[in-house]
Image (spheres, rainbow, N blue to C red):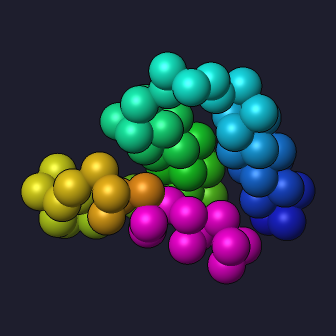
Amino acid sequence: MENTFNFMKSFLAMGELTQDKNTTLADKVKYKERIVFATMRSLIPHWEAPSDWDKISDEAKLERLTKIEKVI
């Protein structure tokens, strides 16, 4: 499982490195969401996004995704 999280962190870091000044907040969220959610689904097959995910702002989503990066 540790290797899976290390891969996730690597992909998230690569995403940070490849972003330019034209990258929108929505783009950042979408990238992180894709990586984090795919990682969670690979570890927990029936994992689902938080129930309020589609209702919260991109700022709140980015904050949650960033917290996950720091915890793992």
- Left or right, 21 with reference to 30: right
Which quadrant of the figure contains the C terminus? bottom right
Quadrant in the rendering for residue 63: bottom left
Question: Which percent across, then down, holds residue 6?
Answer: 84, 56
Kindly report the secondary structure that dominates the magenta region of the rendered protein. Answer: helix
Name, please, the residue furthest toward the bottom: 71
- Seen at 31% across and 64% down, the residue is 60
- Left or right, 20 with reference to 28: right
State whether residue 68 is above or below residue 31.
Answer: below
- Seen at 53% across and 44% down, the residue is 32
Of 42 and 52, nearer the camera is 52
Question: Which percent across, then down, holds residue 7?
Answer: 81, 47
State whether residue 11 is above or below residue 21.
Answer: below
- Seen at 67% across and 78% down, the residue is 71
Name, please, the residue furthest toward the left: 55
- Seen at 49% across and 21% down, the residue is 22
Which quadrant of the figure contains the N terminus? bottom right
Does residue 54 show up magenta in the picture?
no
Of 28 and 2, nearer the camera is 28
- Left or right, 60 with reference to 40: left
Quadrant in the rendering for residue 14: top right
Q: Which residues are magenta?
A: 63-72
Does residue 65 show up magenta in the picture?
yes
| Residue 18 visible | yes
Of 17 and 64, nearer the camera is 17
Question: Which percent across, then down, holds residue 19?
Answer: 64, 28
| Residue 49 visible | no
- Left or right, 66 with reference to 2: left
Question: Which percent across, then down, holds residue 58?
Answer: 29, 50
